Image: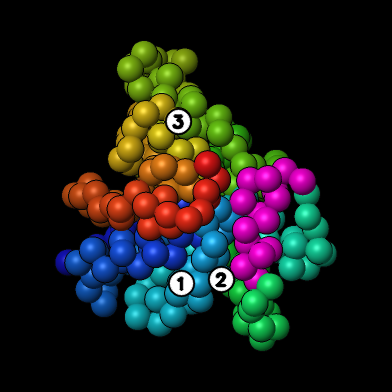
Amino acid sequence: MPKTYAIGDIHGGFNALKELIEKLPLQTQDTLIFLGDYVDGWSDSPKVISYLMQLKNNYTCIFIKGNHDQLLLDYFKNNSMPEQWLHHGGKSTIDAYKNIDSKTKKQHQEFLENLTPYHIDAKNRLFVHAGFTNIKGPSLEYFPEMLHWDRTLWETALVTSNSINLEQKIYPKRLLLFSEIYIGHTPTTRIDQFKPMKAANVWNIDTGAAFKGSLSAIEIGHKTIFQSSPVYKLYPNEKGRN
């Protein structure tokens, strides 16, 4: 039976990515859905993208766009370097690309240009980096960039989970659109959770790999969780985004 795995934010942690993929009991018919933010944080952002490009030759891979991926694409296309981006991992990525040849950079730019904003599978499960704000769904998002910047969907799910009954009229309409929603973007470690966690019907797979957490994956059928070592331990001479 084919399985689907959702993988959280990587943030340049190639060592963690490789370790995690090797832990997954992958079969050729399986699907890997990466929830975005492949870059910025640890020093191996170019290695991460090259590895993902190779991985899709062996498995069905769906690559969602994250906000950090868009920031790197803006840098490639326009030499854009916002101070906030540099402070939140962009500088490590720029430094890493100083030793990368122009052909590889071009290939990586094309990879970033082809990232998908979101994915909905045959069982009406949504995969998106951050969230969405339109109560009719991501396809009608007024500001498409919110798909990789929003935090309100996760915050809504957290406060809804134990306080509002599904049948109540005040139940958030966004949470009724899909059977399940899988996101990254907002680390669960912010609320002292170090494994993927569920709130309402939203699964957050970002377990703080850019900081002190691990890189995580979840097999969405049985909800089996796989994790790398804490990423900072794989980069002992770096700070990541800490």
The picture places residue 101, in percent across and down from the top left corner, at 66, 83
Distance from disc 1 to disc 2, alpha carbons, whole Å, reads 10 Å
Residue 58 visible within the image: yes
Q: Which residue is mark 3?
A: 190
The overriding secondary structure of the stretch rendered in magenta is helix
For the residues bearing labels 1 and 2, Cβ distance under 8 angstroms: no
Identity of the residue drawn at 26% across and 74% down: 29
Q: What are the residue bounds of the magenta stretch? A: 83-97
Amino acid type of the residue tagged 1 in the rendering: Leu
Q: Is residue 220 above or below residue 108?
A: above
Distance from disc 3 to disc 1, alpha carbons, whole Å, reads 27 Å
The nearer-to-camera label among 1 and 2 is 2
Q: Is residue 13 above or below residue 83?
A: below
Q: Which residue is mark 2?
A: 46
The picture places residue 165, in percent across and down from the top left corner, at 34, 16
Q: Is residue 151 above or below residue 1?
A: above
Looking at the image, tell me whether mark 3 or mark 1 is earlier in sequence order. Answer: 1
The nearer-to-camera label among 3 and 1 is 3
For the residue labelled by badge 1, is the local secondary structure a helix, a strand or a loop? helix
Q: Residue 4 lies in what quarter of the image?
A: bottom left
